[in-house]
Image (cartoon, grey):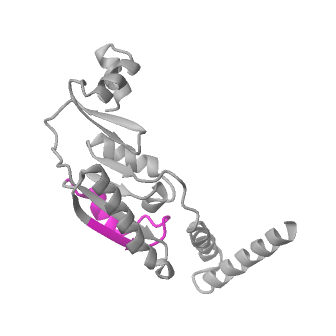
């Protein structure tokens, strides 16, 4: 549960609970997740106990960005090492952040042995709905750790192409949908240049 909820149950102010956590005096196990954002309290230790190791998850949208997978992995290994967390596994995946059927990610999220997943930023995990995934993991005493909170914009065009392609497929059928999507994007880009 979140530290604020635990503080309310204990009838202490959030500020006091926060201070206790940072002074190491909180009477229950707690962990900070998401680059200083959320403090989770593990009051009921009867649930699954996760070790201190982490799983690194890296993703790029297409094969043309495959070189970035290695760079992401190295940055996240350095991040984990700086925190003193041993890396249990590195998972690299190529696929759109809009694709809800990425097999490697689904396997990680459904595995009860994976207690903590590190991603470079929320967009590497999912373009939309990161907060839902994070909440579901937190409810199981698991966490997603974001190394860099800044938004990744390099893949936004690729995701936009996927959305437009999906809509064109629904309207025109699969055949030619990608070409029609590219034409729409080219038109939008040319109109954007004309307005500047």
Q: Give residue 114's position: percent from left, percent from top.
A: 23, 55
Vertical comparison of 70 with 36: above or below: below
Q: Give residue 20's position: percent from left, percent from top.
A: 30, 23
Q: In which quarter of the image is residue 106?
A: bottom left
The image quadrant where one finds the N terminus is top left
The residue at the point 35 percent across, 32 percent down is 2
Q: Quadrant of residue 103?
A: bottom left
The residue at the point 35 percent across, 63 percent down is 57
Q: Can residue 94 be seen in this view?
A: no
The residue at the point 54 percent across, 61 percent down is 152
The residue at the point 46 percent across, 55 percent down is 122
The image quadrant where one finds the C terminus is bottom right
Q: Quick check: 95 left or right of 25?
A: right
Vertical comparison of 173 with 17: above or below: below
Q: Nearer the viewer, residue 168 or 21?
A: 21
Farthest-out residue, front: 82
Q: Give residue 139's position: percent from left, percent from top.
A: 30, 40
Q: Which of 128 and 66 is in front in this view?
A: 66
The boundaries of the magenta stretch are: 90-112
Q: Is residue 71 magenta?
A: no
Q: Quick check: 118 left or right of 112?
A: right
Vertical comparison of 147 with 101: above or below: above
Q: Is residue 183 visible?
A: yes
Q: Give residue 130's position: percent from left, percent from top.
A: 45, 51
Farthest-out residue, top: 11
């Amino acid at each position: 549960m979140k530290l604020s909820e635990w503080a309310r149950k204990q009838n202490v102010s959030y500020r006091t609970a926060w201070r206790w956590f940072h002074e190491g005096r909180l009477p229950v196990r707690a962990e900070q997740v998401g680059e200083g954002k959320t403090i989770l309290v593990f009051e009921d230790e009867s649930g699954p106990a996760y070790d201190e190791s982490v799983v690194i998850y890296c993703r790029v949208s297409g094969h043309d960005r495959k070189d970035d997978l290695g760079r992401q992995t190295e940055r996240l290994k350095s991040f984990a090492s700086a925190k003193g967390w041993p890396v249990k596994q590195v998972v690299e995946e190529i696929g759109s952040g809009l694709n809800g059927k990425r097999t490697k990610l689904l396997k990680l999220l459904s595995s009860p042995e994976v207690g903590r997943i590190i991603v470079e930023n929320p967009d590497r995990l999912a373009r939309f709905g990161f907060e839902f995934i994070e909440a579901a993991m937190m409810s199981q005493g698991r966490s997603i750790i974001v190394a860099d909170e800044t938004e990744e914009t390099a893949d936004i065009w690729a995701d936009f192409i996927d959305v437009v392609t999906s809509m064109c497929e629904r309207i025109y059928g699969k055949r030619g949908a990608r070409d029609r999507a590219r034409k729409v994007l080219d038109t939008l880009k040319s109109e954007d240049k004309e307005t500047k």
